[in-house]
């Protein structure tokens, strides 16, 4: 009996394909000239590390570059982040970080938030492996903190 599981299996395969695609071909990996934000984030427990650079213009991310190394989850998550944040206001970035945190914790995320996250929803399966949630959130939390610090320093 194949029943209703094939739809779930298809969705899992799609999510796995998205994560593998972003791991194998990460987006926005070119260094940013004269970045406004230039930070290193790492998880010493697993060895994931990223160099994140942002150009910020009028409180919005004008350009992003993320390079690093680590597990497939952390690499794919950073690539998905890089695609999402370019052109977004700091408020939109903060909202996306909040949404991804809740998504990975298994908390409620609205359909509107899921629409904003798009392919990032593929990371939802990570919550089955609590030890990997930090891998998925490393670049998000680092970028969010750096953006807050940068804009706070500008008095925005």
Image (spheres, rainbow, N blue to C red):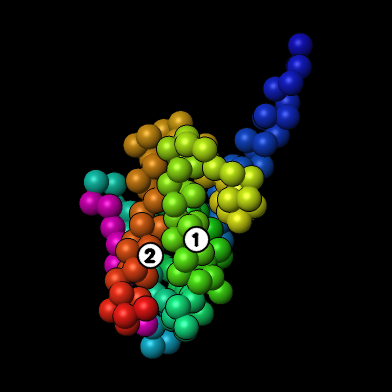
Residue lying furthest bottom: 34
With 132 as the anchor, is 126 left or right in this view? Answer: right
Taking 127 as reference, is 68 above or below it? Answer: below
Q: Would you call the spot at circle 2 few (<14 residues within 10 Å), some (14-19), or many (20 or more)? A: many
With 16 as the anchor, is 46 left or right in this view? Answer: left
Residue lying furthest front: 155
Residue 43 on the magenta span: yes
Residue lying furthest top: 1
Picture residue at 51% right of the left edge, 79% below the top: 62
Q: Quadrant of the C terminus?
A: bottom left
SS for dot 2: helix
The magenta region covers 36-44
Q: Position of residue 147 (x, y in %)?
A: 37, 70
Quarter of the image holding residue 75? bottom left
Q: Would you call the spot at circle 1 few (<14 residues within 10 Å), some (14-19), or many (20 or more)? A: many
- Count of residue discs: 2
* Mark pair 2, 1: CA separation: 9 Å
Instruction: Kindly tell me whether residue 87 is visible in this rendering.
Output: yes
Q: Nearer the viewer, residue 83 or 90?
A: 90
With 153 as the anchor, is 143 left or right in this view? Answer: right
The earlier-in-sequence mark between 2 and 1 is 1
Q: Position of residue 152 (x, y in %)?
A: 30, 74
Q: Position of residue 48 (x, y in %)?
A: 33, 54
Mark 2 lies on residue: 143
Picture residue at 43% right of the left edge, 37% below the top: 105
Mark 1 lies on residue: 81
Q: Are marks 2 and 1 in contact (CB under 8 Å)?
A: yes
Q: Position of residue 26 (x, y in %)?
A: 53, 62
């Amino acid at each position: 009996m194949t029943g209703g599981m094939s739809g779930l299996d298809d969705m899992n395969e799609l999510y796995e394909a998205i994560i593998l695609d972003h791991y194998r071909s990460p987006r926005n990996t070119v260094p940013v000239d004269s970045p406004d934000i230039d930070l290193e984030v790492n998880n010493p427990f697993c060895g994931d590390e990223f160099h994140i650079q942002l150009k910020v213009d009028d409180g919005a991310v004008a350009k992003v570059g993320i390079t690093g190394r680590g597990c497939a989850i952390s690499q794919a998550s950073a690539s998905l982040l890089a695609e999402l944040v370019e052109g977004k206001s700091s408020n939109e970035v903060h909202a996306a970080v909040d949404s991804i945190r809740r998504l990975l914790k298994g908390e409620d995320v609205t359909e509107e938030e899921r629409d904003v996250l798009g392919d990032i929803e593929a990371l939802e399966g990570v919550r089955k492996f609590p030890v990997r949630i930090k891998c998925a959130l490393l670049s998000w939390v680092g970028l969010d903190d750096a953006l807050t610090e940068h804009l706070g320093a500008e008095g925005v």
